[in-house]
Amino acid sequence: MREIVEAHPINRRLCNRIGDDAALWQPSRSHRCVVTTDALVENRHFRRATMPLFDVGWRAMTANLSDLAASGARPVLATVALGLPERFTADELQELYRGMLQIASKHGCAIAGGDTTRAGELFISITAIGEVRPSNVKGRGGALPGDVLAVTGPLGASRAGLHLADDPVLLRGDVAAEAQAAHATPQPRVAEGRWLAASANVHAMMDLSDGLSTDLPRMCAASRCGAAIDDVPVAPSAAEAARARGEDPAAYALAGGEDFELLIAVNARAFRHLSERFYKRFRRPLHRVGLARQGSGIVRVKGGAEEALAATGWDPFR
Amino acid sequence: MREIVEAHPINRRLCNRIGDDAALWQPSRSHRCVVTTDALVENRHFRRATMPLFDVGWRAMTANLSDLAASGARPVLATVALGLPERFTADELQELYRGMLQIASKHGCAIAGGDTTRAGELFISITAIGEVRPSNVKGRGGALPGDVLAVTGPLGASRAGLHLADDPVLLRGDVAAEAQAAHATPQPRVAEGRWLAASANVHAMMDLSDGLSTDLPRMCAASRCGAAIDDVPVAPSAAEAARARGEDPAAYALAGGEDFELLIAVNARAFRHLSERFYKRFRRPLHRVGLARQGSGIVRVKGGAEEALAATGWDPFR
């Protein structure tokens, strides 16, 4: 496996291995380092019966790249700790690494080594390190009452993909393809995160890994504010999956985990200009979802009335 | 758990959290970053029946600090990914973190966050990051034929402690205490590693995590040289445990994993002076174990005759 990783040009360029146990690199002088860690465990975060190992590797790496994106950081390198079950083959290991390498190298991130051991169940623990200008660091605690809350893309497609895996006739055609891709090979918003972090009008940023209904309360708690959600951008596949299951599309999208879109809080006066520039740069809209406000309540505005937003997304301990 | 980690002064001083997902720090300008990852899995690397969780946390952190020591690096921060079984309690989690924090803070290493999830078996995956002057980077590939091979302490005590845990009457008194401490709370040689890395006469360095008989061949393979071992410093507890088990003490110590002493290759002409200075600084001797030499053979010299050294140490896949 080491051979595959080391043969990849990005890994030769960005850092040196010092034996098997350590990797060395030079952070650029004007930047801070950001570090993030995410672990995936078989039968908790994925099932091998329904998910190819390429996708497992891709998703594990994406969870980390998305955390760096939310920090406005440029990915530099990652280390990978693997626990492998007894019957795990070399071909399976290669598929897992292929997925990790493909999405990591797309975003300029080297795999700098790690540790591999036997385990009763497959686990993948990745630590990724990136660089960010000190002035660009946002965190999730900077939202101010009155800020526009926005997301970098429509929500719920990954959840639709999860449901599609369990029920292959749930969706067909384009929406099936959208859901399947969003679930199997989600895209971390690295370029978008760096671009948004460079704007002083963006007050807070985080990635949506557990669903807007779960992650927005985290931003609000860190920022000591409340929020009102009045518009939920629903991915076409999520809308169709919700209808097929007899559920409210917006509620379905609010509860969808692993979309990996970014949630930002933006100075309200700057939002229109920022979203126009965002569209020019990325050819996708910034979707306004609501407003931050005083207090601690988080509500959804529906037909003029307000109802409390329930945290319906992913909780690893539930 | 986050509260415990954040309350520790070293964690407040060294880096900032950006929400739950990322930590931020400033590497000093004249240094390179070193990163290392190690994972421990229940019933593979430890058994909870015979090892308190404080010790499990200590050992997991020590494996990483020892890798940084072998790179000559100053530890800066670590991230921790945990897989916790269903019945794992908050008190148990606290014990695990207490062990990690105690040895990490002793060496100036902050715990900067990580990820916690459910798993079928307990696993602990730690990534540690340190800093090193570019000129001090050694790696394991620099040994030259003629170099003196030396270790920073006597070997085999951790193995004696493992055997003592299975057979409580194997050792008594001081040697029992030595073996127990070496196994439960081993000391990474961080200060020694930084000191040795600063010497241009030290050509290669690595830590002994899997036993000299397993790790020396790794240094030789990376350095494209052979070696002859003619003197194995055996810890008193290892000597007594070997005798009680009817084994050769030197062979017992050669096979002992997790000693976490450093193995170095030193310019032969500089060894005496270096070891005197080492003794003055650390009040412990550098133990000469043999010589690096041409070719690829690794032998043990015993009563004037040479025999091939068999790799008898720890292999996570065996």
Image (cartoon, coloured by chain):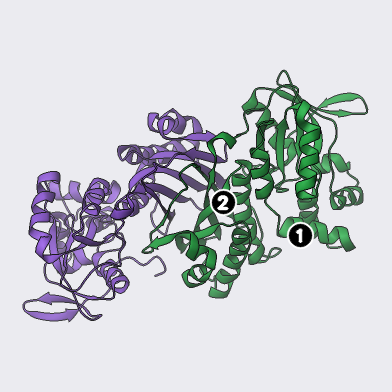
Chain colours: A purple, B green
Q: Which amino acid does label 1 sit on?
A: Ala
Which chain letter goes with mark 1? B
Q: Can I make out residue B224 in this image?
A: yes
Q: Earlier in the sequence, mark 2 or mark 1?
A: 2
Disc 2/disc 1 C-alpha distance (Å): 23 Å
Which quadrant of the structure image shows residue A58? top left
Q: Are marks 2 and 1 in contact (CB under 8 Å)?
A: no
Residue at label 2? B75
Q: What residue is shown at x 87% (from left), y 51% (from top)?
A: B236
Q: What element carries label 1?
A: helix
Residue A143 versus residue A137 in the image, above or below: below
Name the spot of residue B262 as percent of width and height, x first.
70, 42
Identify the residue at horizontal 42%, vertical 57% (top origin). A43
**Pointer 2: residues within 10 angstroms few (<14), some, or many (20+)?**
many
- Residue B254 relative to residue B206: left or right: right
Residue B181: image tag: 1
Looking at this view, is A164 or B66 the one in front?
B66
Along the viewing direction, whichever of B30 and A152 lies nearer the viewer: B30
Q: Badge 1 local density, few (<14 within 10 Å), some, or many (20+)?
A: some
Q: Nearer the viewer, mark 2 or mark 1?
A: 2
Q: Residue at x 19, y 46 (%)?
A: A177
Figure quadrant of the C terminus of chain B: top right
| Residue B186 percent coordinates (x, y) | 71, 55
Q: Residue B119 carries which label?
A: none
Provide the secondary structure element on which disc 2 rests.
strand
Q: Extreme top residue here? A: B295
- Picture quadrant where residue B285 is located: top right
The answer to whether residue B140 is left or right of residue B233 is: left
Amino acid type, callout 2: Pro
Q: Which residue is found at the position 88% from the left and 61% from the top? A: B174
